Amino acid sequence: MDEIRPVRLALIGLGMATKPHLEALMDPSCRVEVAGIYNRSRARAEIVAESNGYRIFESLEQIANDPDIEGVIVTTPPDQRHEIVEMMARTGKHILMEKPIERSFTAAINLVEICERHHVHLGIVLQHRFRAGAQRLQSLTESGALGQIALVRVEVPWWRGQDYYDQTGRGTYARDGGGVLLSQAIHVLDLMLSLVGPAETVQAFFATTSLHRMEAEDFATAGVRFVSGAVGSIVATTSTFPGSAESIVIDGALGTAVLRAGHLEVNWRDGRKEETGEAAATGGGADPMAFPCDWHKALIADFATAIREDRSPRITGREALNVHALIEAMTRSASEGAVAQVASVATSR
């Protein structure tokens, strides 16, 4: 008989990003018991509670002071994170938090360090790493099977309609911290860094196209030099209607790997060809939540196991700082019109 105990987690925030979490948490494979939910809007909380049979918490303090709750899943906008993280970490609650960690690199470092000081695990929801094609490509790059990596190309040709940015705070620096990079492309950029290692320098250009009325960028492009010596390019936008699959292409001495929407194709220099995974929607079109919850299930299950085994989750807050450092350098480069150094992030403390 399976004796693995469920981990008791509370869900904080019930906005758009919560949809795949709610679906994933219904699956027993996550090994999670939902202790309850909290949202600033009581009306929204009541709708979710009625649909799922969840308890509604009246305050963050009620969650923090409940000794039976082991951790929280935080899906609030970035500008609401600091108070939550500080309170939960201080009371020993482990935290699984939606990307980005915070609105700026400096603020993100602060939240990571709060969790480290209080010895609680901080996991970040960067679920693209859990796709089958991505995991196979990870094994190829880690083993050196592709040979020396020379070139990396990333493209995120997504679409968001104006109605998306008409929502209060969308695409603003005050709430989101930026535009397409922090809110959308961060998933693909994080995956890129996990595959080929940290970036060293970038030269970037940002713009807000005539297709959107918004404060931050809806188009970003950059040339990148990696610590390994490889070079690459990044193009990310939410102005490509109707939106198409994001891709990472890695050109190595022994083969070229193309990861597109979760499907991996490798063309080896010796004539072999292999494929892994299936292409799946990832929210690149008008509906940002039009993707399966399978990767969230795997990520939440990993976080629950990390709590049970008292180990780090697969994607820690400190590791996620790498993609924040890259985006911060791209932002600085675009603002100054010059090459920018990417901050080095220690992998552990």
Image (cartoon, helix red, strand yellow):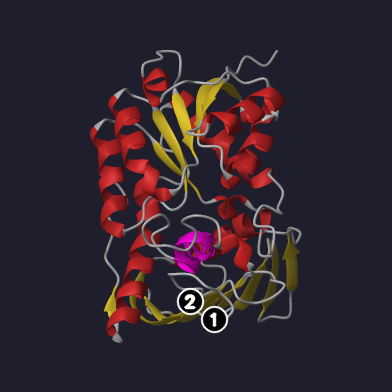
Three-letter code for the amino acid on which mark 1 is drawn: Ala
Residue 132 is a magenta residue:
no
Three-letter code for the amino acid on which mark 2 is drawn: Gln
How many badges with numbers are in the image? Answer: 2
Residue 184 is a magenta residue:
yes
**Residue 200 located left or right of residue 264:** left
User: Which secondary structure class fits the magenta region best?
Assistant: helix
Residue 227 seen in the current view? no
Residue underneath mark 1: 253
As drawn, 242 above or below 125: below
Q: Residue sitting at 27 percent across and 63 percent down?
A: 344
Q: Position of residue 347 (x, y in %)?
A: 32, 52
Residue underneath mark 2: 148
As drawn, 194 above or below 240: above
N-terminal-most mark, 2 or 1: 2
Q: Residue lying furthest left in this view?
A: 117
- Rounded to the nearest angstrom, the CA distance separating label 2 from label 1 is 5 Å
The image quadrant of residue 20 is: top right
Q: Circle 2 — which element?
A: loop
As drawn, 78 above or below 14: below
Q: Nearer the viewer, residue 273 or 117?
A: 117
The image quadrant of residue 121 is: top left
Q: Nearer the viewer, residue 4 or 336?
A: 336
- Answer few, some or many: residues within 10 Å of disc 1's Cα (few below 14, many 20 plus, some between 14 and 19): some
Residue 177 seen in the current view? yes
Q: Position of residue 229 (x, y in %)?
A: 37, 79
- Magenta range: 179-194
- Answer few, some or many: residues within 10 Å of disc 2's Cα (few below 14, many 20 plus, some between 14 and 19): some
Q: Residue sitting at 68 percent across and 44 percent down?
A: 293
As drawn, 77 above or below 94: below
